[in-house]
Amino acid sequence: EVQLVESGGGLVQPGGSLRLSCAASGFTFSDYEMTWVRQAPGKGLEWISYISSRGTTVSYSDSVKGRFTISRDNAKNSLYLQMNSLRAEDTAIYYCARVRNSAYFRYWGQGALVAVSS
Amino acid sequence: EIVLTQSPGTLSLSPGERATLSCRASQSVNSIYLAWYQQKPGQAPRLLIYGASGRAAGVPDRFSGSGSGTDFTLTISRLEPEDFAVYYCQQSDRSHWTFGQGTKVEV
């Protein structure tokens, strides 16, 4: 059974940093592209970052580019999102998801809540 | 960036009725890269349709997708009580993705 479990969320002050992790199991992690999607309270889904299966290709939405960094450790079956210079508008539930064919997100984690507030 | 516009914002229907949800793209989308998701309160999104018309594993056949170019449709042939939720379309273009703003299907 495919499982994706996010961790590392919490309350952080504006300008602060946080690192999210996504632990993958039930599949060969190194074979799959991965992504992060977030959802602000009461709002829609927003894609924020992507990483190829080997980590050689990454991409970001304009809203997080230059502040967030996606990475992965295939030996540890883990995906990461380093978030720096956090703003109030980064408050959201952050989901990791497995990408299929560079097109759609077949499996999702349960999400990690990040709250940016003083 | 390709912008996806979903309509209507809210669809008020009763169980047993047919639901037709629209997703319009600001420029042409390769159908391979068009997907639909369902999200219920407090839950992660669930993939329903990929490649514009392919049904994901475990998705009931009352859900169907169609369209091409800039106009795509998700149809729920007969609404079941568990289908009342928010639906999002999504497209991908050169390793960048965008979602529509969502359509809420309510009773």
Image: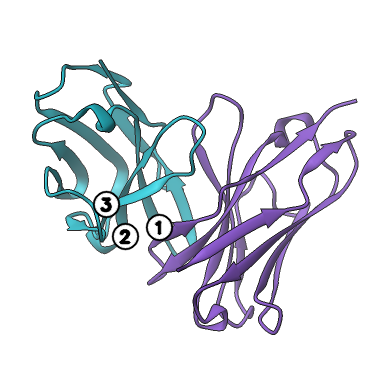
Chain colours: A purple, B cyan
Q: Residues within 10 Å of mark 2 (few under 14, many from 20)?
A: some
Q: Sequence-wise, which precedes: disc 1 or disc 3?
A: 3
Discs 1 and 3 share one subunit? yes
Q: Residue B62 is drawn in which quadrant?
A: top left
Q: Nearer the viewer, residue B3 or B66?
A: B66
Q: Nearer the viewer, residue A46 or A30?
A: A30
User: At which x and y percent is residue A98?
Assistant: 49, 65
Question: Is A114 displayed left or right of B53 in the figure?
Answer: right
Determine the CA span between mark 1 and mark 3.
11 Å
Q: Which mark is residue B92?
A: 1
Q: Amino acid at mark 2?
A: Tyr
Q: Sequence-wise, which precedes: disc 3 or disc 2?
A: 3
Badge 1 element: strand
Q: Amino acid at mark 1?
A: Ser
Residue that carries the numbered disc 3 in the rendered image: B28
Residue that carries the numbered disc 2 in the rendered image: B33
Q: Chain of mark 3?
A: B
User: At which x and y percent is residue B34?
Assistant: 29, 54
Question: Is A103 displayed left or right of B106 in the figure?
Answer: right
Residue at (18%, 17%) from the top-left corner? B13
Q: Amino acid at mark 3?
A: Ser
From this view, report whether residue B47 is shown above or below residue B104: below
Q: Chain of mark 2?
A: B
Query: Residue extending furthest front?
Result: A1
Q: Which mark is residue A62?
A: none
Q: Nearer the viewer, residue A95 or B98?
A: A95
Q: Residue B79 is drawn in which quadrant?
A: top left
Determine the CA span between mark 1 and mark 2.
5 Å
Answer yes or no: do the residues labelled 1 and 2 have beta carbons within 8 Å? Answer: yes
